[in-house]
Amino acid sequence: MKTFNQIIKRSLILFLLLPFINLNAQDAAKIDPAHYNVEVDNDKVRVLRIKYGPGEESKMHTHPEGVAVFLTDHIAEMKTGDGKNMEMTGNAGDVLWVDQSKHQPKNTGNKPFEVIQIELKNSTTAAGKKSLHLFELPEGVSEKQLNDFLKEMNKAISDEGYPEAGYHLYKITDNNDEYKYFMEGVWPDSATYDIIHNSAKWKAAAEKGKDIVDKIRAQELYLKAERVK
């Protein structure tokens, strides 16, 4: 049987190695809803439908890595996060892999263009900051209640412009008499952690589950970890 210390050590190693998308991001759907519409959003992918009229330009924003599927021919100009400009042309039906990027597109053609962008979650860029909560489910709190509450919290975080940050609930499958669950918090860095936790939407969502959180805090083991650079 593994000891509690062994479980803790293994869990911390896993947290340091778990993948994560860079969240120093300006979410396209958040800052430019006129051109970016979310069609699908789950724990695996987010799918955006992107439409630009002739001459229309976006705002500078970021995307995680993923796949772009062009539904129309296109002529565009792309300003990149490092201040460069690049021309883009292509045809309907083109399918491209796109790395994590920061850019500002403009339709320089005389026709509208449309593209589907599939953003992948859980990429290979390591998290800057993680939190770990080990606990037993408190009396009167079900696994479903807690998981539903975390989903509300994650939606509030996504609405603030950080769709890949948030909380994940796990059940410990080893025979461990002290703790049966752990909750992971995933954040890009300490500064963004503070921004999210001071946001109005996060605070409103947290207040709804205050009773659950207080019961867990009363008996949890809480750890923080930051990436070693």
Image: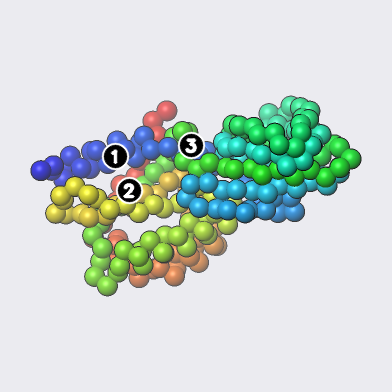
Q: Residue lying furthest front in this view?
A: 93
Going 56% across and 48% down the picture, which residue do you hit?
46
Q: Position of residue 52 (x, y in %)?
A: 79, 46
* Secondary structure of residue under mark 3: loop
Q: Which mark is drawn over residue 12?
A: 1
Q: Is residue 14 left or right of residue 119?
A: left
Provide residue 161's location: percent of width, then percent of height: 59, 51
Foreground of the two, 112 or 180:
112
Q: Is residue 198 left or right of residue 105?
A: left
**Which numbered mark, 3 or 1, is in the foreground of this view?**
3
Q: Which mark is residue 132?
A: 2
Quarter the N terminus occupies: top left
Q: Is residue 6 above or below residue 195?
A: above
Q: Which residue is mark 3?
A: 123
Q: Real-space Cα distance between discs 1 and 2?
A: 8 Å
Report the amino acid beneath label 3. Ser
Give me the residue at 16% from left, 50% from top.
176
Q: Earlier in the sequence, mark 3 or mark 1?
A: 1
Left or right: residue 110 versus residue 137 is: right
Return the disc, 2 or 3, that comes first in the chain's sequence: 3
Q: Is residue 145 above or below residue 33?
A: below
